[in-house]
């Protein structure tokens, strides 16, 4: 059975745009490096 897996990276978030952009960059890197392990990789802020 093939099950689809998603990964959600949750961060506190910041008023600083650059800090939030760093989380988005890491999310993109994880998505790229995960290959077919995850069907979707995203980030969210608290």
Image: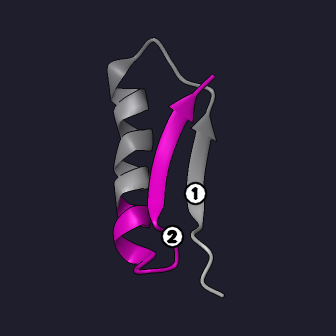
Image location (x, y in percent) of residue 6: 56, 60
Q: Which mark is residue 34?
A: none
Camera-side residue of 24 and 40: 40
Examine the structure image and report whether residue 43 is included in the region drawn in magenta.
yes
Examine the structure image and report whether residue 38 is included in the region drawn in magenta.
yes
Q: Residues within 10 Å of mark 1 (few under 14, many from 20)?
A: some
Tell me which label, 1 or 2, sits earlier in the chain.
Answer: 1
Quick one: which residue is furthest to the front in this view? Answer: 1
For mark 2, give the secondary structure.
loop
Residue under label 1, please give it.
7
Image location (x, y in percent) of residue 36: 43, 80
Image location (x, y in percent) of residue 27: 43, 52
Residue at 42% across, 53% down: 26
Quick one: which residue is furthest to the bottom in this view? Answer: 1
Residue at 58% across, 48% down: 8
Q: Is residue 46 left or right of residue 24?
A: right
Image location (x, y in percent) of residue 15: 45, 11
Q: Residues within 10 Å of mark 2 (few under 14, many from 20)?
A: some
Chain part drawn in magenta? 29-46
For mark 1, give the secondary structure.
strand
7 up-or-down from 33: above or below: above
Residue under label 2, please give it.
38
The answer to whether marks 1 and 2 mark residues whose Cβ atoms lie closer than 8 Å is yes
C-alpha span from label 1 to label 2: 7 Å
29 up-or-down from 14: above or below: below
Residue at 46% across, 67% down: 39
Q: Quadrant of residue 2?
A: bottom right
């Amino acid at each position: 059975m093939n099950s689809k897996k998603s990964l959600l990276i949750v961060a506190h978030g910041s008023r600083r745009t650059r800090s939030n952009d760093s989380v988005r960059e890491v999310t993109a890197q994880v998505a790229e490096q995960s290959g077919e392990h995850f069907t979707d990789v995203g980030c969210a802020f608290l």
